[in-house]
Structures are given as structure tokens and as C-alpha cells.
Amino acid sequence: MEIEINRLPDQAIMAKAKKGLLYWGMASMVIFFGAFCSYYMVIHGNGNWLTFNLPTMFYVSTALIIISSGTMYWAQQSAKKGNTSAIKTALLITLLLGIAFCFSQIQGWKALYANGIVFAGRTSNLAGSILYVITAMHFLHIVAGLLALLVTWTNSLKNKYTPQSHLGLSLCGIFWHFLDALWVILFLFLYYFR
């Protein structure tokens, strides 16, 4: 008796594997940031907590990252429609918004420092230190997202994305939307638990 096994084409297997790896990576990031936020809340409840306002540039960076999620969505929809020029434009705008996000984060850190909120030293407070760690770790993940965006945009210049084949763009989009949502959640967490 022969058993027939339904096999996916090799491309479908690779796509499924790549998406699975991406989801596992994102799950590990959720655990990582969840641990830091939990630590933040435990330390917050212990007293000796410095309450301060988030810098204005963090509000700006939040707006930038939300807009960049919209432009990434535009790129993804353009790929499904086969509009290669729109893919290139949308990815470039997303990349530039991501760079602007990083710049605004650096400006936010400078504003914190100017207001006496420092990472370490005699004048530091755990509230400020943890804020720097959480935002810096997200910043590093955004840099990884920018590298993925750069590769994806470069591939779009070579017209590699079609309605039938746009896995790279899709994976980049999933990761970028995840980073965007992660920042919004972190921002709201830091805003409400000061």
C-alpha cells in the first residue's frame, strides 16, 4: 500500500520556513521587552522613583513611525498590484521615515540628558536608566529594520517584486509593522507608567 504525501512546492516550503523564523524572532523580542517592562514596573513600585515627562521628540518619533507603517502598507499593496514604481517610492519614503525616527530618538535622548535624566552616574536614577535601555534596545531593532528596508528597496530597484513573487517585501513589511507597533506600545507604557 502506497501512502501519498501532499507536498508543497519548494518555494512554498521556503516561504513558510522564513515566515516561521521571523515570527519566532518577533516572539523573542516581545519576551525581551516584556521582561524590561516588568522590571520597570517592579522598580517603579519600590519608591525612589524619579517622575519626568517624556521628551517632545518621542512624540514626534511616534508620529513618524506610525506614518512609516502606512507607507510600508502602500508598498505591500503596490506589490500585489504590480505597480513597481509605487513600490520603489513607498519603500524609499518608509526608509527615510525610519531614519527620521532614529534622528528624533537621538534628539529625545539629548533632551533627557539636558534635563538631568542621565543613564549612569551619581545623578542617575533607575527610572531614567531603564528608559534609556528600553528606548536604546528598540533603536537597535529599528536599525536592523532599516537594513532590511535598504535591502528590500535595493531589490525593488531591480524590479524583483511582482504580484506573484514578493516574499522579501512581505517579510520586511511584517517586521517593520511589528517594530512600529512595538514602539507605540512601549511609548504608551512609558507615558502612563512614569
Image: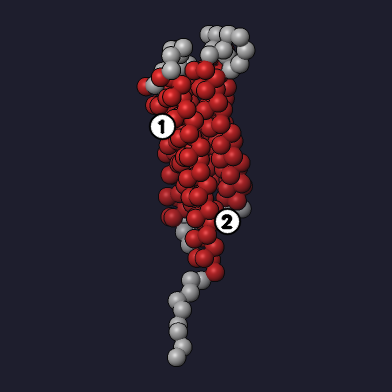
> Residue 130 at what x, y percent from top left?
52, 23
Q: What residue would you read off at disc 2?
A: 160
> Residue 66 at what x, y percent from top left?
42, 33
Disc 2 versus disc 1: distance between alpha carbons?
33 Å
Which of the pair 92/181 is nearer the observer? 181
Q: Which mark is residue 185?
A: 1
Q: Which mark is residue 59?
A: none
Q: Amino acid at mark 2?
A: Lys
User: What residue is shown at x 53% (from left), y 14% (from top)?
Assistant: 125
Please tell me whether mark 2 sits on a helix, a strand or a loop.
loop
Which residue appears farthest toward the left when viewing the image?
A: 192
User: What residue is shown at x 53% (from left), y 8% (from top)?
Assistant: 115
Tell me if residue 30 can be seen.
Answer: yes
Q: Is residue 14 above or below residue 122?
A: below
Mark 2–mark 1 contact, CB under 8 Å?
Answer: no
Which of the 4 image quarters holds residue 42?
top left
> Residue 174 at what x, y percent from top left?
47, 47
- Is the N terminus in the top left, top right, bottom left or bottom right quadrant? bottom left
Mark closest to the chain's N terminus, 2 or 1: 2
Mark 2 vs mark 1: in front: 1
Which residue appears farthest toward the bottom when viewing the image?
A: 1
Q: Amino acid at mark 1?
A: Ile
- Is the C terminus in the top left, top right, bottom left or bottom right quadrant? top left
Q: Is residue 2 above or below residue 114?
A: below
> Residue 2 at what x, y percent from top left?
46, 88
Mark 2 Cα shell of 10 Å, populated few (<14), some (14-19), many (≥20): some
Q: Is residue 142 above or below residue 114?
A: below
Q: Is residue 31 above or below residue 45?
A: below
Please tell me whether mark 1 sits on a helix, a strand or a loop.
helix
